Image (cartoon, grey):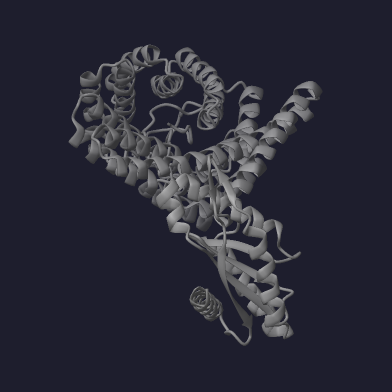
Amino acid sequence: MVLYAACPGSFRGPGVRASLSGLCAKKRTMSSPTSTSTDPLTRLEQQNVRAEELIAANPREALALARSAFEEAQSLGITAPLATSLWVQGIALGLLEQMDESDALLEEAQKLAAQAGQPDLQYRAINGLGANAHRRGHYGRAFSRYHSYLLYAREYRDKVAEARALGNIGLLFQEMGELERSLEIAEQVLELGRQLGRPLLCVVAATNVAEAHLGRSAFALALGISESWRAQARRHGLHVQEALLLAQSGAAKLGLGQAHEAVADLEAAVAAGRRLGDFHDICVPLVSLGEAYHAAGRHADALGVLEEAVRRCAQASSLALQARASRSLMVLHQALGQFEAALGYAQTVLKLQEHVHVERLSRRTEVLAVEFEIDQLRDLAERGRQKMEVLQASNALLHRLQENLQREATRDALTGLYNRRHFLQRLATALEESAESGLRFAIAYLDLDRFKSVNDTYGHPAGDALLAEVGRRLEASLEPGDVVARLGGDEFAVLMYEAKDSVAARAGVERLMVAIQEPLAWGAAVLECSASAGVAMFPEGGQSAAELLHEADADMYRHKRRQSRAARRKARGG
């Protein structure tokens, strides 16, 4: 992904920078920035031009030059260069990931440019603010600012600005998984670049066209685009774009089943990325290279590269790529017969995919909200209604996913009861409230009798069915407000708020044990169901959760011993 961020400083994606040559909205007519002038205004303007040209290649040096020009202009009382100096500083700081300071400077540059009647610079600052929001993942805000920049470009018929704005909007759609819209926009930008005779604009747009084709599994189209434009990138010395297109060529060949050819391209792309330094985000080519190694039968190489890719993706917070790399590792371990490792990666992939889905829904919802506002301003009632429906559906799905994540964090997967962690949280809350109010409560600890023999005799599915049924019966028999949880294995616990003494607590436990003692049919067999239980009262049984659980557990074992002695006496008497 290559983000169209600044002119002429950079098109930049996460970890990707590229020098631009001649991509400004206007041609410079002043003397070379390296020349000297005795006129302070001309000299400061030349210094700003030089800083602007350095943004992509060396943002720190660009920042220092622009700050120097700003400070000198202030000391001399010259206002004309101030907005440009602030804009360069803001863009450079954005590339250096210092977003808060970058936003402040770009907002000030926007105000000064508006006051000075410089709409080009004013909207370039807005575009820069959009790029910062994009990097932060604030897609609605980014889309709104890119759209403002696009309206300016079309009003002033500034085709280069239009290409930048469209390119950024297309990238938002690409990252949201809307590949058809992304492809359509990237092809528009490519055509604008051809019309304007701007090689870098064409190469960057071609990179995004190829990426959209890869996302649609149109591998032959992606290969044709990447190979034809790679030659253009090399001819114009655009080394970062050449490396990106080489990686896309390798990915396309892999998709076409040309594993060995793909390995050659992807090895070269990863090597170029490491060599270039600026092109440090090599997650995509690393993942593709690992997959190509696997397809070519080079399993050891695949394992090392994919493990590096997972680490890099995690560091870059690239959930979608991390999920893809983890899935490739799962397939690799499965092919090697390492099923435990494969299972671990499968579980990781499931978790990551759910988070990726939530992230994409959130981004899509933000952008849809902004699009809906724009449609309202244009009085497109029907289109606005359709987008609102999609927005509401996205919000509802996002809400359900968030509820599912919350449920998974608090519920036992087998029984649907609360889990140990949540039970301990509720118990801690009860202790705090009772310490203040002086109210008493009880906890009960239940352990199923002969559960191991059920597993041994009928298998784990029978044991799971018994646990699930016990959980259902316990929950159905609770007093209002009481809480039941599965602590693990065949152990359950109940928080009994209304039990004010041990007699009431024991009566409540007996009621629960009666509720669960009905046998459970399992095929042709009948599973006996009973439990032993112990009770602990607060505050007599302990002052902390650990003490109360320990006392309830000890009471359960005392109760078991009493039952055992009674059974032996009965047997002797018989």
Q: Is residue 48 above or below residue 239?
A: below
Residue appearing at x 72%, y 28% in the figure? 387
Q: Is residue 423 above or below residue 326?
A: below
Residue 14 location, quadrant: top left
What count of labels does the image hold?
0
Q: Is residue 201 visible?
A: yes
Pick the front one: 24 or 490: 490
Q: Is residue 240 left or right of residue 39?
A: left
Q: Is residue 396 left or right of residue 58?
A: right
Pick the front one: 218 or 521: 521
Pick the front one: 420 or 151: 420
Pick the front one: 241 or 477: 477
Residue appearing at x 28%, y 38% in the figure? 306
The image position of residue 362, as x and y in percent, is 60, 40
Q: Is residue 142 left or right of residue 462?
A: right
Residue appearing at x 70%, y 71% in the figure? 508
Residue appearing at x 48%, y 77% in the figure? 572
Q: Is residue 408 visible?
A: no
Q: Quadrant of the N terminus?
A: top left
The image position of residue 149, as x and y in percent, is 61, 32
The image position of residue 124, as x and y in percent, is 56, 36
Q: Is residue 499 left or right of residue 455?
A: right
The image position of residue 257, as x and y in percent, is 29, 16
Q: Is residue 302 above or below residue 252?
A: below
Residue 471 location, quadrant: bottom right
